[in-house]
Amino acid sequence: MSELTEAVAAPQQQATDGRAPVVSVRDLWKVFGPKAAQVPQSEELAALSRRDLMERVRCTAAVRDVTFDVAPGEVFVVMGLSGSGKSTLVRCLTRLVEPTAGEVVFEGENILAASKKRLRELRRQKFSMVFQHFGLLPYRRVVDNVAYGLEIRGTGRAERTRRAMEVIELVGLGGYEHSYPDQLSGGMQQRVGLARALAADPDILMFDEPFSALDPLIRRDMQNEVIRLHHEVGKTMVFITHDLAEALKLGDRILIMRDGEIVQIGSPDEVVGAPADDYVRDFTSDVPKSHVLTLKWVMRAPQAGEVDADSPVLQSHQIVRDAARAVLDHRGPCRVAEGDKVVGMVDDEDILRVVVAEEGLK
């Protein structure tokens, strides 16, 4: 790693764009067991490993002292292996699972202090969830499945049908609005689930491994659909997955969990370029670095007299693969900028070093 980029190696806990977060999670715990409430309050118990905690007080800490923010319009991905606590975490955000301790603040409101009535309002109007199992109503047509949340909210038939038809077109299901779920493929059923979540126009969409049961090609199509919809509607999203490739493809930032704890939070290039420990390093070892790393990871400080006012200017956030053509075609050092400020230089050797390292992994 070059000296210029060492500063980005530290994991990011919080969003850094200056906007007030949509969701702020502070010191969140979820402990299962007969003495669950004691664990977060005791430094001794909180420090125990999963196995020792079970032996000591017959408890399991599924989420351990987790803190993070989600910025407006961000796709925030939570990933980890089975049993890491990621699904429990996302369910704690809407109190589908009751947290043991900590704080979940949504748009300035502490969700954990909300009454049952207020919680129902938030779930109907502010949150929408998309699960792995679609949960479609088998005897309702697509349009009625999509409109179901609006029906529960009390929206009139004409208005909810109009809104359902809008989002059916948005997710690419136009022409299937009168079909029943069993007449659709798995991917199409998941699009119905996505349309149902969008129909209520929530402030935040939460996905709990929604595509893990789909065939690889359909899964890729649905990932692309989420990216397209995010660009079109700009919703804040929290996305749970065990698949690193999916996390890198979808996430603006990624939270990696192990045994209920945060291992690292960062953008895809930070996770790949500066893994926090051997656990993350093993996760990312087979990732094509040129597909993820940005120029800030390969640029270097300009040498005396090297800055050429006529050389191409590339932005530091550009992916190495996408910038490679311009660098190789120029056959000389190119300037790397952040906005209007030149912050480094990159040449064909810097680009090829990443590509050669990838080939060495194969």
Image: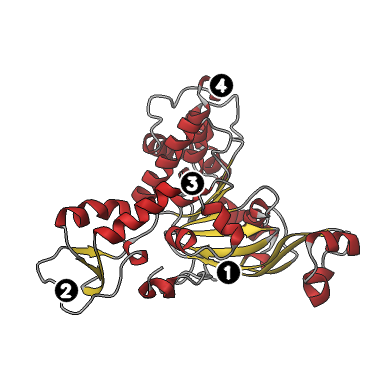
Pointer 1 or 3: first along the chain: 1
At label 3, counting other C-alpha atoms closer than 10 Å, the crowd grade (few under 14, some 14-19, many 20 or more) is few
Q: In the image, is residue 137 above or below residue 285? A: above
Residue position for label 2: 307
Residue sitting at x 83%, y 64%: 36
Is label 2 or label 4 in front? 2
Q: In the image, is residue 68 above or below residue 305? A: above
Does residue 291 appear to the left or right of 201 in the view shown? Answer: left
At label 4, counting other C-alpha atoms closer than 10 Å, the crowd grade (few under 14, some 14-19, many 20 or more) is few
Residue sitting at x 28%, y 52%: 322
Numbered circle sitting on residue 109? 1
Residue position for label 4: 182
Q: Are marks 3 and 4 in contact (CB under 8 Å)?
A: no
The image shows residue 258 at horizontal and vertical percentages of: 66, 58
**Figure colour scheme:** secondary structure
Residue 209, quarter of the rendered image: top right
Dot 4 amino acid type: Asp
Numbered circle sitting on residue 245? 3
Q: CA distance from mark 3 to mark 2?
A: 37 Å
